[in-house]
Amino acid sequence: MSGSRLSMLGAALFFPVAAYADVSLTNRDSKAHDIIIKCASTSHASIGPNTTRGVGKGPCTVTLKSTNASATGNGNDTLVIHNGAIGRK
């Protein structure tokens, strides 16, 4: 196979993987947080201290139940909880 054909094959293999990237949520706090996750549907969950978890395919909005603060991520974004606040990395 020629180099250009290999490059095209590599690109074809890469892009489908990128299309299925999930939004992730990292909790940098030393306590757990109850959250609301809204992607295609809405669910209630929690995230433990110093933990990272997948949220879903974007766009997804995560809301902290304790403060009602929220952040929205898309694609392979990472949302971060730190000192009781949430934002996009």
Image (spheres, grey):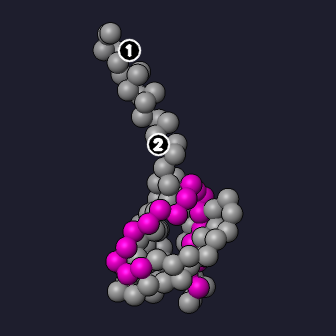
* Residue 7, image x, y percentages: 36, 22
Q: Residue furthest bottom?
A: 66
Q: Secondary structure at mark 1?
A: helix
Q: Residue furthest right?
A: 41
Question: Which stretch did the figure color magenta?
Answer: 48-65
User: Which quadrant of the structure image shows residue 56?
Assistant: bottom right
| Residue 70 in view, yes or no | no
* Quarter of the C terminus within the rendering: bottom left
* Quarter of the N terminus within the rendering: top left
Q: Nearer the viewer, residue 75 or 51?
A: 51
> Looking at the picture, which amino acid does disc 2 mark?
Ala
* Residue 27, image x, y percentages: 40, 76
Image mark count: 2
**Numbered badge on residue 18:** 2
Q: Eyeballing the image, is 77 above or below 29? A: above
Marks 1/2: CA distance?
20 Å
**Numbered badge on residue 5:** 1
Q: Eyeballing the image, is 39 above or below 11? A: below
* Residue 11, image x, y percentages: 42, 28
Q: Residues within 10 Å of mark 1 (few under 14, many from 20)?
A: few
Q: Earlier in the sequence, mark 1 or mark 2?
A: 1
Q: Residues within 10 Å of mark 2 (few under 14, many from 20)?
A: few
Q: Secondary structure at mark 2?
A: helix
Q: Is the stretch drawn in magenta largely helix, strand or loop?
A: strand
> Looking at the picture, which amino acid does disc 1 mark?
Arg
